[in-house]
Amino acid sequence: MNPEQFDLDGTKDKQLTAEKLCAGCPVLQDCAIDALANGDVGVVRAGVWIPSYISGGHFQSAHYSLLRYAAGMEATNVA
Protein backbone atom coordinates (compact mmCIF):
# COMPACT_ATOMS: atom_id res chain seq x y z
CA MET A 1 0.00 0.00 0.00
CA ASN A 2 1.19 3.49 -0.84
CA PRO A 3 1.76 5.54 2.36
CA GLU A 4 0.79 8.72 0.49
CA GLN A 5 -2.79 7.39 0.38
CA PHE A 6 -2.95 7.99 4.12
CA ASP A 7 -2.02 11.68 3.84
CA LEU A 8 -5.47 13.23 4.05
CA ASP A 9 -4.49 16.91 4.23
CA GLY A 10 -6.38 17.81 1.05
CA THR A 11 -9.26 15.42 1.64
CA LYS A 12 -12.69 16.85 2.43
CA ASP A 13 -14.25 13.87 4.25
CA LYS A 14 -11.29 12.47 6.14
CA GLN A 15 -13.24 9.95 8.22
CA LEU A 16 -15.01 8.39 5.24
CA THR A 17 -11.71 8.17 3.36
CA ALA A 18 -10.04 6.54 6.38
CA GLU A 19 -12.78 3.93 6.61
CA LYS A 20 -12.42 3.10 2.91
CA LEU A 21 -8.62 2.87 3.12
CA CYS A 22 -8.74 0.36 5.96
CA ALA A 23 -11.83 -1.64 4.98
CA GLY A 24 -11.10 -5.35 5.26
CA CYS A 25 -7.71 -4.92 6.90
CA PRO A 26 -6.82 -8.04 8.89
CA VAL A 27 -4.91 -6.12 11.59
CA LEU A 28 -7.49 -3.45 12.41
CA GLN A 29 -7.64 -4.32 16.11
CA ASP A 30 -3.84 -4.45 16.46
CA CYS A 31 -3.58 -1.14 14.62
CA ALA A 32 -6.06 0.49 17.02
CA ILE A 33 -4.19 -0.82 20.05
CA ASP A 34 -0.89 0.48 18.63
CA ALA A 35 -2.40 3.88 17.83
CA LEU A 36 -3.70 4.25 21.38
CA ALA A 37 -0.39 3.11 22.90
CA ASN A 38 1.60 5.59 20.82
CA GLY A 39 -0.79 8.55 21.05
CA ASP A 40 -0.90 8.95 17.27
CA VAL A 41 -2.39 12.16 15.86
CA GLY A 42 -2.74 13.57 12.36
CA VAL A 43 -2.89 10.12 10.76
CA VAL A 44 -5.20 7.30 9.73
CA ARG A 45 -5.11 4.32 12.05
CA ALA A 46 -7.54 1.38 12.13
CA GLY A 47 -9.91 3.10 9.74
CA VAL A 48 -10.10 6.19 11.93
CA TRP A 49 -8.89 9.69 11.05
CA ILE A 50 -7.14 11.04 14.16
CA PRO A 51 -6.93 14.84 13.87
CA SER A 52 -3.68 16.59 14.69
CA TYR A 53 -5.43 19.02 17.01
CA ILE A 54 -6.20 17.47 20.37
CA SER A 55 -9.20 19.48 21.42
CA GLY A 56 -12.78 19.26 20.34
CA GLY A 57 -15.24 16.57 19.47
CA HIS A 58 -13.42 15.16 16.44
CA PHE A 59 -10.44 14.01 18.49
CA GLN A 60 -12.67 12.57 21.21
CA SER A 61 -14.73 10.73 18.59
CA ALA A 62 -11.58 9.28 17.00
CA HIS A 63 -10.24 8.16 20.37
CA TYR A 64 -13.58 6.52 21.22
CA SER A 65 -13.62 4.68 17.88
CA LEU A 66 -10.06 3.41 18.42
CA LEU A 67 -10.98 2.16 21.90
CA ARG A 68 -13.93 0.25 20.42
CA TYR A 69 -11.75 -1.32 17.70
CA ALA A 70 -9.10 -2.20 20.28
CA ALA A 71 -11.75 -3.98 22.32
CA GLY A 72 -12.81 -5.94 19.23
CA MET A 73 -16.04 -4.03 18.79
CA GLU A 74 -17.30 -2.21 15.71
CA ALA A 75 -16.52 1.48 15.94
CA THR A 76 -19.34 3.97 15.91
CA ASN A 77 -19.08 7.63 15.08
CA VAL A 78 -20.23 9.64 18.09
CA ALA A 79 -19.36 13.13 16.87
Image: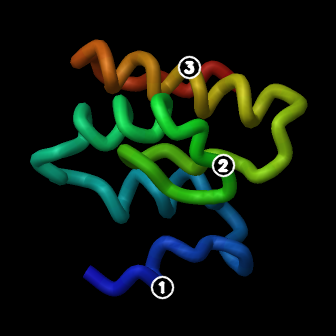
Q: Which mark is residue 64?
A: 3
Quadrant of image for the C terminus: top right
Q: Position of residue 62 (x, y in %)?
A: 60, 33
Secondary structure under badge 3? helix
- Count neighbours of disc 1 (C-alpha within 10 A) and say few if under 14, some if 14 to 19, many if 20 or more: few
Kind of residue indicated by mark 2: Val
Q: Would you place residue 6 above or below residue 13 in this image?
A: below
| x 46%, y 30%: residue | 37
Query: Residue at (63%, 20%) from the top-left corner?
Result: 78
Q: Amino acid at mark 1?
A: Glu
The residue identified by callout 2 is: 41
Residue 78 located left or right of residue 58: left
Query: Could you classify mark 2 by the number of other residues whose Cα lies within 10 Å: few (under 14), some (14-19), or many (20 or more)?
Result: some
Looking at the rendered image, the disc whose residue lies closer to the viewer, 1 or 2, is 2
Please tell me whether residue 28 is drawn above or below residue 76 in the rendered image: below
Q: CA distance from mark 3 to mark 1?
A: 25 Å
Q: Residue at x 41, y 80 (%)?
A: 3
- Quadrant for residue 43, please give it: bottom right
Q: CA distance from mark 1 to mark 2?
A: 16 Å
Instruction: Give left or right: position of 16 versus 12.
Output: left
Q: Report the number of numbered marks.
A: 3
- Identified by mark 3, the residue type is Tyr
To which quarter of the image does residue 64 belong?
top right
Which residue extends farthest left? 26
Of the residues under marks 2 and 3, which one precedes in the sequence?
A: 2
Reading the chain from its start, which is encountered first: label 3 or label 1? 1
Element carrying mark 1 = helix
Q: Quadrant of the N terminus?
A: bottom left
| Residue carrying label 1 | 4
Q: How is the image coloured?
A: rainbow
- Determine contact: label 1, label 2, CB under 8 Å: no
Element assignment for label 2: loop
